Image (cartoon, rainbow, N blue to C red):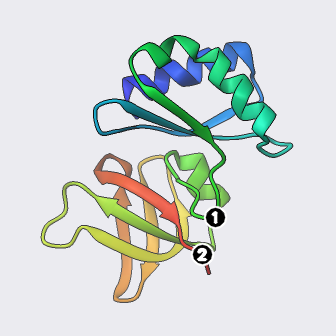
């Protein structure tokens, strides 16, 4: 998790504790994309409210706040545990020669996620994951 995401999570925990930050990522040098979730769903009004809590970041970035959509990002062990039995695509940063894995999430510990991929079971440490999203079934 990046320092920027940690900062955003801390701010929102204080301002709007029911909002969960799924992913905060820089796209290019100037665009900050924040995916959020909420127990009652993500509405335009919620996105506007979150944007206002992060208003000072607009001085440095073009800020986008949105719902996760069908290809929801998975970034934390709790996210992976919640979606055991669902298909996910994991892109890693350290594995060679293969860096992409798609398969069913079969377990998620505090250190790694395990997928049932087409060519077998693979355990991937969270530290090696560059990005992960659910795959529409």
Q: Tell me if residue 130 comes above or below residue 133 in the rendering.
A: above
Residue at 38% from the left image edge and 17% from the top image edge: 60
The image shows residue 79 at horizontal and vertical percentages of 60, 51
Residue 55 placement, left or right of 111: right
The image shows residue 107 at horizontal and vertical percentages of 54, 65
- Dot 2, crowdedness within 10 Å: few (<14), some or many (≥20)? few
Q: Earlier in the sequence, mark 1 or mark 2?
A: 1
Q: Which mark is residue 17?
A: none
- Dot 1, crowdedness within 10 Å: few (<14), some or many (≥20)? few
Check if mark 1's residue and mark 2's residue have beta carbons within 8 Å. yes
Residue 2 placement, left or right of 23: left
Q: In the current view of this chain or complex, which residue is farthest to the left? A: 97
The image shows residue 29 at horizontal and vertical percentages of 28, 32
Q: In the current view of this chain or complex, which residue is farthest to the bottom? A: 119
Label tally: 2
Q: Tell me if residue 125 comes above or below residue 23 in the rendering.
A: below
Q: Tell me if residue 49 comes above or below residue 32 in the rendering.
A: above
Quadrant in the picture for the C terminus: bottom right
Label 2 SS = loop
Q: Which mark is residue 136?
A: 2
Label 1 SS = loop
Residue at 41% from the left image edge and 24% from the top image edge: 61
Query: Where is mark 1, residue-wise?
Result: 70
């Amino acid at each position: 998790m990046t320092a920027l995401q940690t900062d955003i999570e801390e701010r929102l925990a204080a301002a709007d504790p029911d909002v969960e930050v799924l992913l905060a990522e820089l796209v290019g040098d100037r665009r900050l994309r924040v995916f959020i979730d909420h127990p009652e769903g993500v509405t335009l009004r919620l996105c506007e409210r979150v944007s206002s809590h992060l208003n000072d970041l607009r001085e440095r970035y073009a800020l986008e706040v949105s719902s996760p959509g069908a290809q929801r990002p998975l970034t934390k062990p709790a996210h992976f545990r919640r979606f055991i039995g669902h298909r996910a695509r994991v892109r890693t940063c350290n594995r060679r020669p293969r860096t992409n894995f798609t398969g069913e999430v079969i377990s998620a510990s505090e250190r790694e996620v395990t997928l049932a991929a087409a060519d077998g079971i693979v355990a991937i440490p969270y530290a090696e994951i560059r990005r992960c999203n659910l795959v529409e079934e």
